[in-house]
Image (spheres, rainbow, N blue to C red):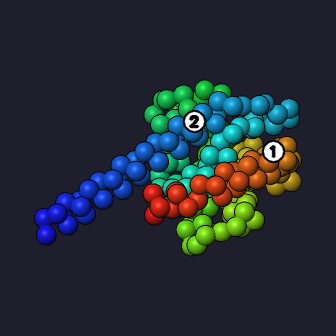
Amino acid sequence: MNSVMALRASTINNKTLDAAIGVTFFIIATALGAYIRIPVPGTPVPITLQTFFVVLSGAVLGSRLGLFSQAGYIFLGAIGLPVFQGYGFGVAHILGPTGGYMIGFMAASFLTGRILEKESHNLFKIAASFAIGNVVLYALGILWLMLIYRISFVNAILIGVLPFFTVELAKIFLAAIVYSKISHRSKAIFS
């Protein structure tokens, strides 16, 4: 009886450790993705590698832990660590032009994870779930741009979505390939 209890406690401790490592990894990966920054003329929003890690965080960790990883990333930036794009930090940065996208990170990670928690998926379904996550992320980014710049929906699309469309498709495709290769292992660890 004691050996069964010890094994159960060890399994719980391992799951907790696995979750902590996974969440920490995606916080760091999202922060590093912010440092890969390409300014885009005509828009206050740069191209970064963050969305690649956002959708992967939900897929790999699941909806709950994926959400925690992105909330943790935003929290670290809010308290002053320079983890945002352009080495930014603080609440003022969150309230700037990319704030809606950052809130979208949490929503996209959660939604992507929720979709993929159901069952195993082929590459097309994985890419589609990543695309859905990105649509939510960009929708929140557009709404935020409309609010802070007081611009129309069309103008928000022009500066907040169109310049990134091709790059986002490439990131979705690459993230889907990566996840399709590791999905069975990640489900065994984080489910």
Residue 189: where, in percent of width, then height?
Answer: 45, 57
Q: Say which quadrant the N terminus sits in.
A: bottom left
Q: Residue furthest bottom?
A: 118
Task: Specify the quadrant of the image occupied by residue 83.
Answer: top right
* Distance from the alpha carbon under mark 1 to that under mark 2: 19 Å
Structural crowding at the residue carrying mark 2, measured as other residues with C-alpha within 10 Å and reported as few (<14), some (14–19) or many (≥20) = many
Residue occupying the point 24% across, 61% down: 7
Structural crowding at the residue carrying mark 1, measured as other residues with C-alpha within 10 Å and reported as few (<14), some (14–19) or many (≥20) = some
Q: Secondary structure at mark 2?
A: helix
Answer yes or no: is residue 17 visible: yes
Q: Which mark is residue 167?
A: 1
Task: Specify the quadrant of the image occupied by residue 50.
Answer: top right
Mark 2 residue type: Ala
In this view of the protein, which residue sits in the foreground, 120 or 160?
A: 120
Q: Is residue 62 left or right of residue 177?
A: left
Residue 6: where, in percent of width, then height?
Answer: 19, 60
In this view of the protein, which residue sits in the foreground, 26 or 183?
A: 183
In this view of the protein, which residue sits in the foreground, 24 or 134?
A: 24
Q: Secondary structure at mark 1?
A: helix
Q: Residue furthest left?
A: 2
Residue occupying the point 85% across, 43% down: 163
Residue that badge 2 annotates? 31
Residue 53: where, in percent of width, then height?
Answer: 62, 46
Mark 1 residue type: Val
Residue occupying the point 86% across, 54% down: 154
Q: Is residue 40 left or right of residue 135?
A: right
Q: Is residue 151 left or right of residue 49?
A: right
Q: How many marks?
A: 2
Residue 142: where, in percent of width, then height?
Answer: 74, 52
